[in-house]
Image: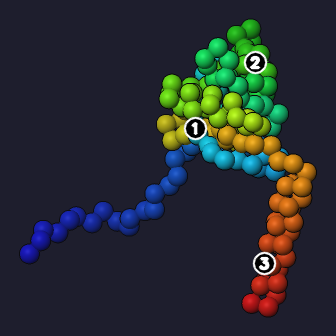
Amino acid sequence: MAPRLPYFGRIMAQKSDPNSKLIAENRQARYHYAIEDDLEAGIVLMGSEVKSLRTGQSNIAESYASVENGELWLINSYIAAYKEAGVFGHEERRHRKLLVSKKELSRLWSAIGREGMTLVPLAMYFNDKGRVKLKLGIAKGKKLADKRETEAKRDWNRQKQRLLKQHG
C-alpha cells in the first residue's frame, strides 16, 4: 500500500504572478502592418523610468526600433517623467537601447534590409521576474487595399457571430 500524503486543506488554484503585467500595447500595429515574426527584447532603463512604468504612464504607438552602429534602439517611445525623481529624472522621449543576442541582431538586420520591412513594438510588459520586456514584430507595411480586406474580414466575422448567436 502506498503511503498517504498529508492533507493541508483545499488545493488553491495558482494565481497569476503579480509582477507580470502589460504596460503599453500598440493596438494599431496589426492594422497598419502585416506582422511576419516577433521576438522578445530586454530594454535598458533608468530607475525613474521603471517607477513611471509601474504607474502605467507610457506610450509605444508612435515608436519603432532601428539598428544603429551594431546595436538595437527603441526610438520615439514615451515614458512620462516621474515627479518624485526630481533632478535625477529622465528625458521622456530618449532613445532606449534594446537587448538582444548577436544572433538575433544579425537576423533582424537582414530582415530590415529586405524591401519594406521594419521593426514595430507590439507590447511592453513586466515579465514574471519583474523585468521590463518589449515584444517586437518584424513587419511589412500594408497597402490601403490590404487594410480594407482586413477590415472586411473582421466585419464578416462579427456578422457571423451575431447570426450564430441569434439562431444558435
Q: Which quarter of the rendering shows the N terminus?
A: bottom left
Q: Amino acid at mark 1?
A: Glu
Looking at numbered disc 2 in the image, what kind of residue is underneath it? Arg
Residue at x 87% of width, y 48% of height = 143
Where is residue 88 shown, x and y percent of the image? 70, 10
Q: Position of residue 83 (x, y in %)?
A: 77, 20
* 115 vs 99: above or below: below
Q: CA distance from mark 2 to mark 3?
A: 44 Å
Q: Residue at x 70, y 25 (%)?
A: 66
For mark 2, what is the residue?
A: 94
Q: Amino acid at mark 3?
A: Gln
- Cα distance in 3D space between marks 1 and 2: 20 Å
Mark 1 surroundings within 10 Å by alpha-carbon count, few (fewer than 14), some (14 through 19), many (20 or more): some
Q: x%, y% of residue 39?
A: 58, 40
Q: Residue furthest front?
A: 115
- For label 1, the SS is strand
- Residue 40: image tag: 1
Q: Is residue 128 visible?
A: yes
> How much space separates mark 3 and mark 1, taking CA atoms?
33 Å
**Marking on residue 161:** 3
